[in-house]
Image (spheres, rainbow, N blue to C red):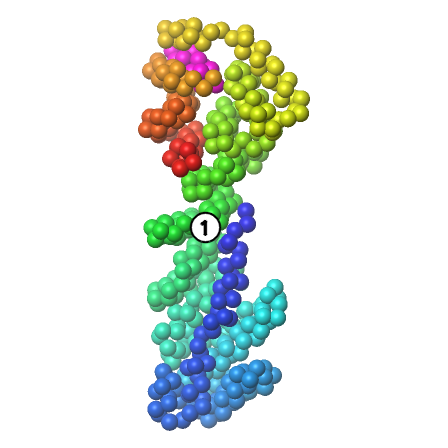
Amino acid sequence: MKTRMETISRLALAAVLATGLGSTALVAPAVAQKNKKDDKAAGGGLKLTPAVQKPAAEAQKAMQANDMATAETQLAAVEAAAAASTSDDDKYVAAALRYDFETSKMRAALTANPNAPIDQSVLGKPLDVLIANPKTPAETRPQYVFRRGTLAFNARQYPQAIQYFEQARQLGYKDPDLDLQIAKAKLEGTDVKGGLADLNTVIEKQTAAGQKPPESFYRYGIQKANAAKMGPETVVWIRKWVGAYPTAKNWRDAIFVYGLQPTSVAKLDNQQQIDLFRLLRASKALADQYDYREYAQKVYDRGLPAEAQSVLAEGFASGKLTGNADAKSLQTLAANAQRNESPLATLATQAKASANGKLAAQTGDAYLGQDKYADAAGLYRVALQKGGVNADEVNTRLGIALARSGDKAGAQAAFAAVTTAPRADIAGLWTTWLTTPSA
């Protein structure tokens, strides 16, 4: 899944280059003036040694004139003098000018070619000096720390990036993507669990602020949880995603990612897959002839010819099965099988008199396949009362019958009674569908 996350580094760099740090404004008065009044106006009372002051002023002047060759020569002289000096002021000015010089070069390169490869590592040394230097203004330090974190992140030094980002936050740095950057550094590193928790916090904060978090956030959470083989967490993020963006396409993708493809999160048997296909149908997410054909074949093999016929009829009506000879043949087989079935009313009477709930569950399945939801629900309750059945499976289907009949409260209670994976996950997906606006 491609996400907005992939673009954060370049966007962060673009923001740096577009706005700058304002270090030129801090340095210029100090290197150009000598009187105390102007030093005070500079904001830091910088006292430069003559060996630094003269080339610094020339370097700054050359940068303002876009004469980068001269600026480089003068800057080298500044750095040599600052290295030999014991003055924090000298070292601060040298680092600030180097930072401005390199960001100016990057800005020019990006302007000439937005896709140009950019080596940001050259900013690391001056940023380290600026962060540690006592002459760095307190209001500027958080921004330096954040940008140092961005460099570490881009170098895939995720533990260091997290430290810088968290330090920037402690220093009061305000950036709408700071929390997201911390989450991403954890997710790209080794703390997937912590990153998912942080990403969820970002989503909750945006939601509480009346904003709709981007769909890419949810997809990113699914991708990272699934890659880390964190099955339960992946299911949670799948549910968050379709709950926030309940389109038919998303429902299909979510259900297939969870349990209907070879690389699915969960390995399901046919009975479990049938209930996912039923969710595809309920969410109007059956998309192509494979979906209709596979669904119909599974329920036909399960002994539910009426449901197979109904699904195939929908597929032909939608135009998705037009000209599909296999589907037409299956439809004929299902029709013949249904004619040979025993009357459901007779089976229902027998089920209520049985010693266990097996026949009641099977007859409930048949009623569910015929869209006779009230009859199905009644028999599922009989099955649960008599016992001898898979309670999680029966409760799942009781919930489906109640959901399809419009009894949301009853359906939620039935789904909540399903406690063992993967049935609990299937019931959870049904609950998400039931409680979203699309339902």
Residue 305, image x, y percentages: 54, 15
- Left or right, 120 with respect to 408, comes to right
* Residue occupying the point 50% across, 76% down: 99
- Left or right, 41 with respect to 110, comes to left
17 and 78: which one is in front?
A: 17
Q: Main secondary structure of the magenta part?
A: helix
* Residue occupying the point 37% across, 77% down: 137
136 and 316: which one is in front?
A: 316
- Return the residue at label 1: 214
Above or below: residue 399 compared with residue 63 = above
* Residue occupying the point 54% across, 83% down: 63
Res 167 visible: no
Above or below: residue 72 compared with residue 354 = below
Above or below: residue 399 compared with residue 256 = above
Residue 158, image x, y percentages: 48, 59
Residue 186, image x, y percentages: 45, 54
60 and 137: which one is in front?
A: 60
- Left or right, 205 with respect to 181, comes to left
Task: Kindly identify the amino acid type of the residue bearing the numbered disc 1.
Answer: Pro
Residue 183 magenta-drawn?
no
47 and 218: which one is in front?
A: 218
Res 340 visible: yes
Crowd around label 1: few <14 · some 14–19 · many ≥20 (10 Å)? some
Residue 359 magenta-drawn?
yes
Q: Look at the image and give the residue range highlighted in magenta.
A: 356-369
